[in-house]
Amino acid sequence: MLPIINEEHKKIIDRKIAQLREMVRANAAMVTAANEFGNTSLHLASLIYGNVEVVSILLEAVPEQQRSAFVMAINEYGNTALHLALRSGDVKIAKLLIEAIPAVRRDALVMVRNLDNKTGLSNNLCK
């Protein structure tokens, strides 16, 4: 059963979202930086089910001409943010990621294979 979010929880979430917007505005470079495993903020946000607003903020922070590379970035396991979003079962985030890049690049994103030779879709369907 999902936890019930009351008004106090909503206020806390809204404050955290506002803080994230400020952090991104102050230091846009942190958005695309990768950790020691090759994960960007987009990888990490996509892994958490229901993080649609956070993913949107991160995508908006990256200039349009760099967004495809950001969305298609792979970590050390060959996973894109799409792989991770689908692994968590979040179709809304997956759709947001796919629609964030030009239509001509979408097939390439969906077909990226990780080190296990799985696409994001096969990762999700073949657990």
Image: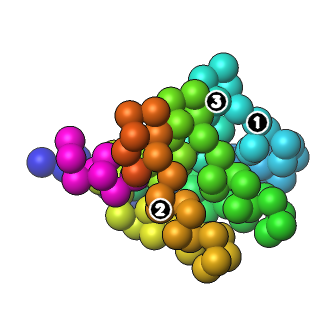
Residue 33's disc number: 1
What amino acid is labelled 3 in the image?
Answer: Gly
Q: Quick one: label 2 or label 3, which is nearer the N terminus?
A: 3
Tag 1 secondary structure: loop
Distance between the alpha carbons at the discs numbered 1 and 3:
9 Å
Is residue 61 visible to us here?
no
- Label pair 2/1, CB-CB below 8 angstroms: no
In this view, the residue farthest toward the top is: 36
Residue 38's disc number: 3
Within 10 Å of disc 2 (Cα), the crowding (few <14, some 14-19, many 20+) is some
Taking depth in this image into account, of 104 and 15 the one nearest to the observer is 104
Q: Quick one: label 2 or label 1, which is nearer the N terminus?
A: 1
Task: Answer with left or right where residue 32 lies relative to residue 93.
Answer: right
Q: Nearer the viewer, mark 2 or mark 1?
A: 2
Identify the residue position indicated by label 2 in the image. 110
Within 10 Å of disc 1 (Cα), the crowding (few <14, some 14-19, many 20+) is few
What amino acid is labelled 2 in the image?
Answer: Val
Is residue 92 visible to us here?
yes
Q: Which residues are magenta?
A: 120-127
Task: Answer with left or right where residue 103 lies relative to residue 98.
Answer: right
Distance between the alpha carbons at the discs numbered 2 and 1:
23 Å
Residue 37 lies, with reference to residue 2, above or below; the image says above
Taking depth in this image into account, of 34 and 19 the one nearest to the observer is 34
What amino acid is labelled 1 in the image?
Answer: Ala
